[in-house]
Amino acid sequence: MYMAYSNTNSTHTPHRSASTSKGMTFNSSYTKAIVRFVLLAVILGTVFSFGAMVQAYAGDGAATAKTPVSVNSINSSPKAVVQDQVVIQRGDTLWDVASTHKKGNENIRSYVDKLKTINHLTTSSLEEGQVLLLP
């Protein structure tokens, strides 16, 4: 590029012609908008992909429910049966407990025998605070 100088004292500085820079510069507002869009797309992509990974690895618990369980172990295990209990107070006897808790017209002597069998009693004596299971 050739520049001509003159002897005049002017403050005019030489500049390039407009034809050389035409189409080469971007407006700064467009550049900022594009950078913001790309940054927003990267952030959203990261957030959504992280959420998808968490959901994929967390699962909903269905995998543990589908694990095979031996049928024999379920059928042969003893089932917990909630039985009524009575705590023996001072002066209680097996006869008193049997007469209070027997069903309808059941014989008291047979109920005393059931109490002894269930609670593994060898005698009819009871102690204060002892817990008896009721048949």
Image (cartoon, helix red, strand yellow):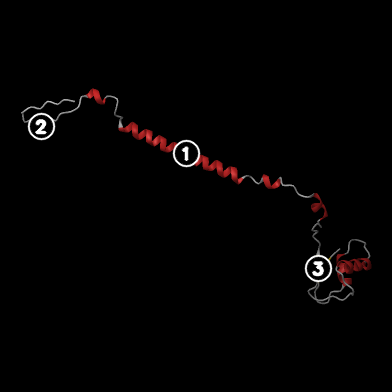
Q: Which mark is residue 86?
A: 3
Q: Which residue position is annotated with label 2? A: 11
User: Could you tell me the amino acid type at mark 2?
Assistant: Thr
Which class describes the residues within 10 Å of circle 2: few (<14), some (14-19), or many (20+)? few
Quick check: 32 left or right of 58?
Answer: left
Q: Quadrant of the C terminus?
A: bottom right
Q: Which mark is residue 44?
A: 1
Q: CA distance from mark 1 to mark 3?
A: 66 Å
Q: Which mark is residue 36?
A: none
Q: What is the x, y in percent for residue 33?
A: 36, 33
Q: Nearer the viewer, residue 101 or 41?
A: 41
Q: CA distance from mark 2 to mark 1?
A: 53 Å
Quick check: 94 left or right of 11?
Answer: right
Q: Which quadrant of the structure image shows residue 27?
A: top left
The reply to whether the C-beta atoms of the residues labelled 1 and 3 are less than 8 Å apart is: no
Quick check: 78 left or right of 46?
Answer: right
Q: Earlier in the sequence, mark 2 or mark 3?
A: 2
Of circles 1 and 3, which is in front? 1
